[in-house]
Image (spheres, rainbow, N blue to C red):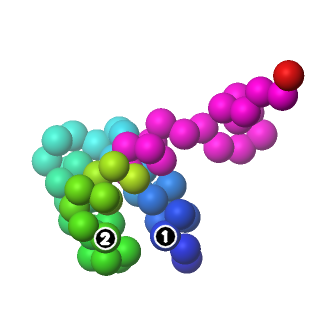
Amino acid sequence: MTRTEVTAKYGRRDKKASQKNKRAVLNEVVTVTGWTRDNSRRRLTQAANTRQGPGDRSFRAS
């Protein structure tokens, strides 16, 4: 599993989690990826706010 896949997976969990569980998710990501807490937090937030799949509207062709 790549780091991108890891952050996408954990990003979805993090978005729905309580504050206590967000800490646990962040700790897991830091352990799995080897990133710093600051970088992991930033990537989780980005992954949680990115829509993926066939309904992805983040890219609009003009």
Q: Which residue, given by chain and number where applicable, does mark 2 sit on?
A: 35
Marks 2,1: beta carbons within 8 A: yes
Q: Is residue 59 magenta?
A: yes
Q: Nearer the viewer, mark 2 or mark 1?
A: 2
Q: Residue furthest top?
A: 62
Give the secondary structure at mark 1. Answer: helix
Q: Which residues are magenta?
A: 44-61
Q: Is residue 10 left or right of residue 50?
A: left
Q: Nearer the viewer, residue 21 or 35?
A: 35
Q: Which residue is mark 1?
A: 3
Please provide percent x and percent y for residue 8: 50, 55
> How many C-alpha atoms fall within 10 Å of the one at disc 2: few (<14), some, or many (≥20)?
some
Estimate the x, y position of residue 9 in percent, counting from the top left.
48, 57
> Which one is nearer the viewer's eye here, 60 or 55?
60
**What amino acid is at disc 1?**
Arg
Examine the rendering and report whether any part of residue 13 can be seen: no
Q: Earlier in the sequence, mark 2 or mark 1?
A: 1
